[in-house]
Image: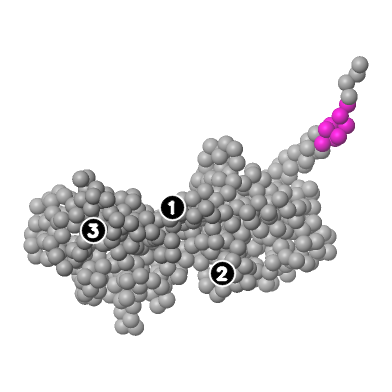
């Protein structure tokens, strides 16, 4: 008996082959015309860009505007030799737009032109930036209290057949991240699906799993917004874009690296509202804060903050700059990259070639600055110039990667700095970490166990200023998670330590002592270590002992 011939399956197979042939031809023609090939069936079409060309003219010229970032407009062309294109180019360039041209297949172009039907209910964005309107953000803030809320929303959107809704998944993710104060957005392709994670209060948390098609759409959207190459998938790329939210511009730094299952995206959200926090809001101990405010007002010196990536070093330095900013003070920064824009301060960015930290610092010294911020001391050249600047009438702020304040000086020696200069040049060595703080509405007090008391007493035993000792170690607090995904923590707070230069310490450092010896020597100054600062915050109900142990290395008892 003859087998049944599946007509529908064969037709689908032939259609797939024709589509592949059409896309292959478009790739070949893109090389001929010197244009980048793209496929608009996987690249989201921005309806705000689309409306820049009237539909009738777009169909006549076989062109579609599919992305707009600032003054840069991306155009999809079916035939670069279409005579109707010249008038469209002229009209767009007259509006101050820079055109980036991509070659697409007829099928791909149809996908974009069909989006004109969505313009009646599409979102209109503010020119020049990726916009989330105040009304939209207000709605999303009401919707997105937790990761469970975000998952429910994305399930609903992705099950919808409305193209305009699905194309805004990325906007929903961004808005949700802002609503929940996420510092980073991670999009990571795996063997089965693509994982979305948000860093909330310093901890990465799973948020959603996308399908491949949605991932490709989001990835192309991120690349276009960040000014990166769509057709490059085998090497790392870095970019940035700006989000406008209710009159506030938030910078987003994009990092892309290739992986086994596709490109991994990390978006760092740099919200300038974090810079409005005072030192008190950041959790700096009153005794330490009073001394820091005195030290940074010296006419010259070097203040170094240390800690791992994400420990809040840059935010602390910017807070210092805000404290010092007056009309009669010239402040210049050298950063890589500029993370936040500060009013009234000259900020410059290294390019890794002819304007590095070292060459930039030498150039800045010729600008007659009073205060200089160097993003990071990475090598001997930068260390030497920073020390010399601190010796010649400038106050310099910078960062180092070490574990604690005492490690600052051995690290400088490792970089090739002369320890004999430390006494005259270095004013303050700081270290800090960020801990999650307890949700005040849900935290639960309980008696401390004997083991917990012994641990806290051991940490505080080296403190030489008795006025800072707690009255007792009886009560600690626990985080209370909820069923809707809340962890029981809300926000973050810093723990800090600092070593201040004095004559005795300067003499001690000339012999290049070890990190441990420096830490013991500095105890006589009577300031809290990070561990001691953390214990006081635990006893005050601001965080848990578990969180402190996660962030700071505590002694074994």
Near-viewer residue (552 or 23)? 552
The mark closer to the camera, 3 or 1, is 3
Q: Is residue 307 visible?
A: no
| x and y percentages locating residue 87 in the rendered image | 77, 66
Q: What's the residue at 43%, 55% (across, down)?
A: 480
Q: Is residue 182 left or right of residue 365?
A: right
| x and y percentages locating residue 223 in the rendered image | 58, 54
| x and y percentages locating residue 43 in the rendered image | 67, 51
| x and y percentages locating residue 362 in the rendered image | 30, 65
Q: CA distance from mark 2 to mark 3?
A: 47 Å
Q: What's the residue at 50%, 45% (across, down)?
A: 257
Q: CA distance from mark 3 to mark 1?
A: 28 Å
| Mark 3 nearby-residue class (10 Å; few <14, some 14–19, many ≥20) | many
Q: Is residue 106 left or right of residue 292?
A: right
| Mark 2 nearby-residue class (10 Å; few <14, some 14–19, many ≥20) | some
Q: CA distance from mark 1 to mark 2?
A: 26 Å
Helix, strand or loop for disc 1: strand
Near-viewer residue (46 or 273)? 273
Q: Which residue bears the numbered disc 1?
A: 203
Residue pushed farthest bottom? 327
In the rendered view, would you say 304 is above or below 410? below
Magenta segment boundaries in residue numbering: 5-12
Q: What's the residue at 45%, 70% (across, down)?
A: 273
Q: Is residue 373 magenta?
A: no
Q: Which residue bears the numbered disc 3?
A: 473
Q: Which residue bears the numbered disc 2?
A: 244
Q: What's the residue at 62%, 67% (across, down)?
A: 139
| Mark 1 nearby-residue class (10 Å; few <14, some 14–19, many ≥20) | few
Mark 3 or mark 1, which has the lower sequence index?
A: 1
Q: Main secondary structure of the magenta part?
A: helix
Q: Is residue 259 left or right of residue 7?
A: left
């Amino acid at each position: 008996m003859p087998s049944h011939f599946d007509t529908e399956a064969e037709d689908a197979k032939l259609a797939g082959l024709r589509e592949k042939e059409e896309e292959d031809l478009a790739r070949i023609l893109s090389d001929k015309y010197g244009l980048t090939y793209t496929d608009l069936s996987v690249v989201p079409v921005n309806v705000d860009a689309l409306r820049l060309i009237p539909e009738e003219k777009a169909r006549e010229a076989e062109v579609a505007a599919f992305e707009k970032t600032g003054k840069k407009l991306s155009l999809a062309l079916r035939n670069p030799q279409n005579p109707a294109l010249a008038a469209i180019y002229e009209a767009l360039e007259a509006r101050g737009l820079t055109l980036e041209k991509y070659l697409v297949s007829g099928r791909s172009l149809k996908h974009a032109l069909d989006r004109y039907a969505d313009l009646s209910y599409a979102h209109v964005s503010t020119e020049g930036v990726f916009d989330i309107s105040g009304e939209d953000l207000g709605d999303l803030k009401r919707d997105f209290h937790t990761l469970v809320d975000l998952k429910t929303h994305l399930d609903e959107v992705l099950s919808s057949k409305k193209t305009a809704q699905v194309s805004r998944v990325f906007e929903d993710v961004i808005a949700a991240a802002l609503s929940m104060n996420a510092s980073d957005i991670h999009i990571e392709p795996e063997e089965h699906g693509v994982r979305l994670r948000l860093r909330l209060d310093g901890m990465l948390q799973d948020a959603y799993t996308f399908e491949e098609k949605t991932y490709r759409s989001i990835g192309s959207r991120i690349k276009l917004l960040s000014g990166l190459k769509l057709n490059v998938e085998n090497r790392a790329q870095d970019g940035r874009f700006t989000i406008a939210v209710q009159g506030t511009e938030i910078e987003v730094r994009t990092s892309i690296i290739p992986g086994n299952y596709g490109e991994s995206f990390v978006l760092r959200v740099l919200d300038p509202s974090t810079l409005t926090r005072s030192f008190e809001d950041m959790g700096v101990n009153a005794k330490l804060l009073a001394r820091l405010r005195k030290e940074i007002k010296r006419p010259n010196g070097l203040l170094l903050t240390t800690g791992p990536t994400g420990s809040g070093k840059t935010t602390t330095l910017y807070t210092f700059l805000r404290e010092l900013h007056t009309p009669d003070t010239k402040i210049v920064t050298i950063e890589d990259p500029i993370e936040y824009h500060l009013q009234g301060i000259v900020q410059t960015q290294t390019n890794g070639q002819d304007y590095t930290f070292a060459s930039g610092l030498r150039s800045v010294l010729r600008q007659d600055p009073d205060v200089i911020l160097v993003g990071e001391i990475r090598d001997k050249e930068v260390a030497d110039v920073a020390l010399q600047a601190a010796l010649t009438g400038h106050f310099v702020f910078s960062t180092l990667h070490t574990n604690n304040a005492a490690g600052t000086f051995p690290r400088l020696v490792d970089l090739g700095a002369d320890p004999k200069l430390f006494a005259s040049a270095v004013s303050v060595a700081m270290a800090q970490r960020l801990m999650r703080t307890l949700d005040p509405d849900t935290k639960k007090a309980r008696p401390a166990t004997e083991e917990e008391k012994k641990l806290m007493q051991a940490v505080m035993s080296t403190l030489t200023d008795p006025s800072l000792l707690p009255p007792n170690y009886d009560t600690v607090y626990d985080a209370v998670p909820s069923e809707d995904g809340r962890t029981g923590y809300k926000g973050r707070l810093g723990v800090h330590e600092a070593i201040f230069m004095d004559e005795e310490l300067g003499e001690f450092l000339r012999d290049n002592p070890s990190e441990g010896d420096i830490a013991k020597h500095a105890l006589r100054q009577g300031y809290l270590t990070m561990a001691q600062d953390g214990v006081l915050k635990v006893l005050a109900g601001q965080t848990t002992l578990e969180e402190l142990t996660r962030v700071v290395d505590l002694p074994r008892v």
